[in-house]
Image (tube, grey):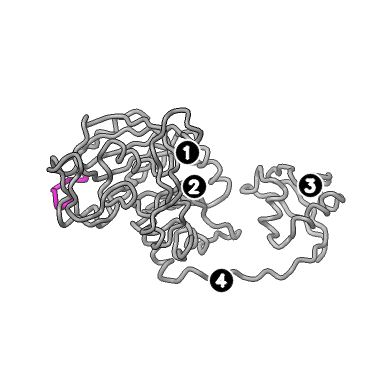
Amino acid sequence: MAVQTFEVNEDEEGMRLDRWFKRRMPMLSLSHLNKIVRTGEVRVDGSRVKTATRLAKGQSIRVPPLKLPAQVAPAQVVSPADLDTLKSIIVFEDRDLLVLNKPFGLALQGGSGTTRHIDAMLAAMPNERGDRPVLVHRLDRDTSGVLLAAKTRRVAAELGEVFRSRQARKIYWALVEGVPKPAQGRISLYLAKGDGLGDARSTRRGETRGSLEKMRVVAHGHEDARHSVTYYAIVDKVPPRLAWLSLKPVTGRTHQLRAHAEAIGHPVIGDPKYGRTAAAVTHRNDPMRMIPEGIERKLHLLARRLVLPHPRGGTLDVTAPLPPHMQHTFDMFGFDPERFDPIENAPG
């Protein structure tokens, strides 16, 4: 292999030199990289550098002759049917973004016993440079709805900052047990992970034990406490059995909406971790509250809408339709998805 010269492209702007090598030459060992950088064999615009040097678009990187082991092509884990599934749930796409309508029960990433997941499907959709779309936020396995991916590392970093700075407006719909009072409110609690024992039922479904730690309400000052805030509003209801809530999370804690619903005494219907799933189960504090027969015991939680600044200007505003099991429940009670959503007026 002869001396090679590479130009830093737009997507590599701001990347550390060691990460650049990991991306461009994944078979190069870290010890070998450290050696050729230390001896000055690697140059950026003709100058000596360190592995932590940040790169700028258009810079020239000199790479000395390298003896790399042959790279073994990864096994193809995505079937044509899975790729068809992925393509069928795309609700918006442009040169920078990919927005999916994630179905109930499809995991985002692999785990013990989980081989079919969105991350693997996205890996089978590289662009012309070999870069694959990157998920920029998360949904629980059983939550349906809007899921955003970036097509380049640069866009992923920009969107990550949008979420961290709370510029993204997220609206969720949920059907919950009983009817909360008041009809609109703010839930402000400190949450921490549970005892880590997980849920045997869900573990058998292939989720990792760590992802299943139940969040619990703790006092301010607890060493693991993280503040969480959600605004909610009742859109429609069938007293005293259930209510359709619209929720606007201000923070983005693990299982936040599910934990908040349980904390106010109105868990999301079909929640195996924070609710009750037995048919027609009676609430311990309200003998009149019973989950009606005919409702599917699936999590009734939908990431309904996502609004945020588009990386190239303007606004991205996408909405997901009801998943089949929630549509069935809406039809049972005559709920109209076009009804005015009062959460639109909530802060955040």
Q: Amino acid at mark 2?
A: Val
Q: Which residue is mark 4?
A: 75
Mark linked to residue 44 = 3
Q: Amino acid at mark 3?
A: Val
Q: Residue at x 45, y 64 (%)?
A: 114
Q: Residue at x 46, y 65 (%)?
A: 113
* Residue contact between numbered discs 2 and 1, judged by CB atoms under 8 Å: yes
The answer to whether residue 45 is left or right of residue 86 is: right
Q: Locate the N terminus and report the quarter of the image it occupies.
A: bottom right
Nearer the observer: mark 3 or 4; the answer is: 4
Q: Secondary structure at mark 3?
A: strand
Instruction: Give yes or no for residue 63 being in the magenta stretch.
Output: no
Front residue of 145/222: it is 222
Image quadrant where residue 24 sits = bottom right
* Residue type highlighted by circle 1: Phe
**Disc 1 and disc 4 in contact, CB within 8 angstroms:** no
Task: Decide which of 205, 5 is in the foreground and name it.
Answer: 205
Q: Which residues are magenta?
A: 330-338
Location of mark 1 (residue): 163
Label located before the other in sequence (2 or 4): 4
In the rendered structure, which disc, 3 or 1, sits on the residue that comes first in sequence?
Answer: 3
